[in-house]
Amino acid sequence: MIEKQNPKNDSTKERISLVVEKLGKIYDDGTVAIKDLSFKLHDGEILGLIGPNGAGKTTTLKCLMNLVEPSEGEIRIKEFPAGTREAKASIAYIPEIPILYNDLTVREHLKFVTMAYRVPEKKALGRIDRLLKEFDLQNRGGETPIHFSKGMRKKVSIMCALVHNAQVFLIDEPFIGLDPRAVQTLKNSILAAKEAGMSVLFSTHILDMAEKICDKFLILQNGIKIAEGSLVELRALAGFQNRKETTLEDIYIALTEPILRETQAEEKDQ
Amino acid sequence: MRAIIWKDLRTIVYHPQKLLIINAALLGLVIWLGMSKGDILRTSDSTFLFLMPSVMLMNVYQFSFQLIYSEKLNKSWEKILYLFDTGQVFLAKSIVITLVSWVISIIFGSSFLIFNLLNGGSFPPPFVFLFSLFLLPVFAFVLSELMILIMSLIGQLIVVRIIFIPFFIAALTSVLEAGKYSLDIQLFKLAVYTAIGIGISFLLFLLTKKISKERLVTSS
């Protein structure tokens, strides 16, 4: 399903899909959702955005999609500022809770997305048929998702993201609510996207899955970046450089525990 | 924008129940007028002139609610606002609402006209047709822009619905009183009103472009 990107002339130079610089977001009620967040995502890289609830993961994704206006900082997607037509054409978003229209059939959902991204009709039809087959929904393309299970709705949402030729995938909690086969399909799709030179940024709580497929991790807590790097780099940061069996979960707990205690102590004082 | 128009037309067509109920009620009103107030029907200029806007207004009212309610119910602002600009979304919805309402009002207008002519009524002057073809869609467009703007920014749709009800009842009852009005619309005035309508709709479009996506997403 994933179509390869056209390689550029300068193949030796490392290409960047996404640049976030000093991003900050303070909501109208004064809540600081993100503070001074900077990171880069390269072509063909999978970055896992990890953090507890309220860490600022979803706000970060929404800023990237230009649904939430950052209070400060800059976002560039494929060298274009977030929100521009070029930037929008480069990204695909899979929300945590599938956003589907109860009036449209599965096929119509996919057609709507291809129309929005101006995919030529013949190409769009081919992609829709392939996706329906890959996700085992070829017999349900004419049904509306109103009575679909959570997992089925998620599948439709994922198909909507895959149906156009995006180069950067933004995924919010991708594996929640999916059956094992759909998890496998999504995992394969993410890895295929990486192979084709596309970049994936996903937020997740499921650390063992993130450990299996991510190249890099970014740990957020209270809207602040705690750590960023590969598993090896994070191990070193957490002081586990000589313990290769240490999992991402161990590292995550080791890095976030002191801040968690600090926050709890501050709350107690207040 | 073509994609939103395509999707919204489907939303309306796949849920014809409300469309049928509203228009059946309007049809009932016209038939009742024909049966009990034959003299009003025979003064077809003014009745025609009031019937078409009433049909159109009722449909604009219903479709604006239906399309915004669909986005709020499905919590889908996020989906369309990351794909499109706010201005594009509002413009596409206004086009769909105006188009469908206009087609329905033309069906009503034509049926009324044929019925009236068969019953010995007179043919309305040409400016009445010009009014229906040019000015009416412009007014409907302005009204749809206004309604979807208010409906999308106010969380409680039912409040908006209640606020607008008296206006639409007034529009409907004007049909009953149509015989009392005399027509004084000249071609020049028609052109001026149309130009004003287009100007207002353009200003409203500029205003919708300024609405923040964050506000729409959080209001749903």
Image (cartoon, rainbow, N blue to C red):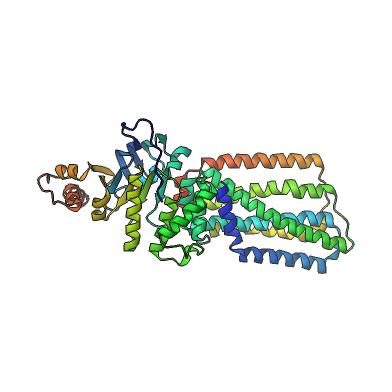
Q: Residue furthest left?
A: A242
Residue B101 placement (x, y as % from top left): 67, 55
Figure quadrant of residue A23: top left
Q: Nearer the viewer, residue A21 or B30?
A: A21
Figure quadrant of residue A231: top left
Q: In this orientation, does residue B25 appear?
A: yes
Q: Is residue A214 above or below residue B179?
A: above
Figure quadrant of residue A81: top left
Q: Residue at x 27, y 43 (%)?
A: A224
Q: Is residue B15 above or below residue A266?
A: below
Q: In this orientation, does residue B174 appear?
A: no
Is A201 situated left or right of B163 in this image? left
Residue B160 placement (x, y as % from top left): 56, 56
Residue B192 placement (x, y as % from top left): 74, 39
Q: How many marks?
A: 0
Q: Residue at x 35, y 55 (%)?
A: A186
Is B147 situated left or right of B27 in this image? left
Is A210 situated left or right of A132 in this image? left
Q: Residue at x 56, y 56 (%)?
A: B67
Q: Residue at x 47, y 43 (%)?
A: B212
Residue B164 placement (x, y as % from top left): 62, 56
Q: Is residue A202 above or below residue A75?
A: below
